[in-house]
Amino acid sequence: MELSYTYWQEPDGWLLGYFNAWPEHITQGKTVEELEFMLKDIYELMELGEEAQQKSPVLMQGELALA
């Protein structure tokens, strides 16, 4: 699987980037390799988050009358 990402270099030398599918999740690295490592971490977190949402139980509320 391949995901496209966008990145740029800041004046201080750091590379910032994000997956085009999740532009709100920006990460950084000092090298392209480090940036890609951090992007893989974001991918894993996003995939785990989606799986967790699918497996989350439905929460319900009730009231108990006590004497």
Image: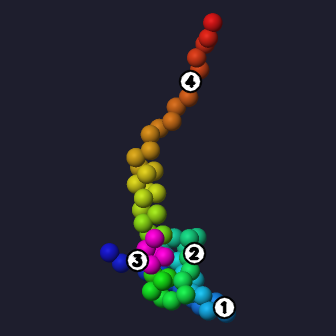
SS state under label 4: loop
- Viewed as shown, does residue 1 lie left or right of 23? left
Main SS category, magenta section: helix
Q: Are marks 3 and 1 in contact (CB under 8 Å)?
A: no
Residue that carries the numbered disc 4 in the rendered image: 62
Q: Disc 3 and disc 2: Cα gap in Å?
A: 15 Å
Which of the marked residues, 4 or 1, is nearer the chain's N terminus? 1
Front tag of 4 and 1: 1
Circle 2 Cα neighbour tier, 10 Å, few/some/many (<14 / 14–19 / ≥20): some
* In this view, 36 is above or below 60: below
Residue that carries the numbered disc 2 in the rendered image: 26
Q: Disc 4 and disc 3: Cα gap in Å?
A: 44 Å
Which of the marked residues, 4 or 3, is nearer the chain's N terminus? 3
**Span highlighted in magenta in the image:** 37-41
**The C terminus - image quarter:** top right
Which of the marked residues, 2 or 4, is nearer the chain's N terminus? 2
Q: Which of the pair 25/12 is nearer the observer?
A: 12
Residue that carries the numbered disc 1 in the rendered image: 12
Q: Disc 4 and disc 1: Cα gap in Å?
A: 55 Å
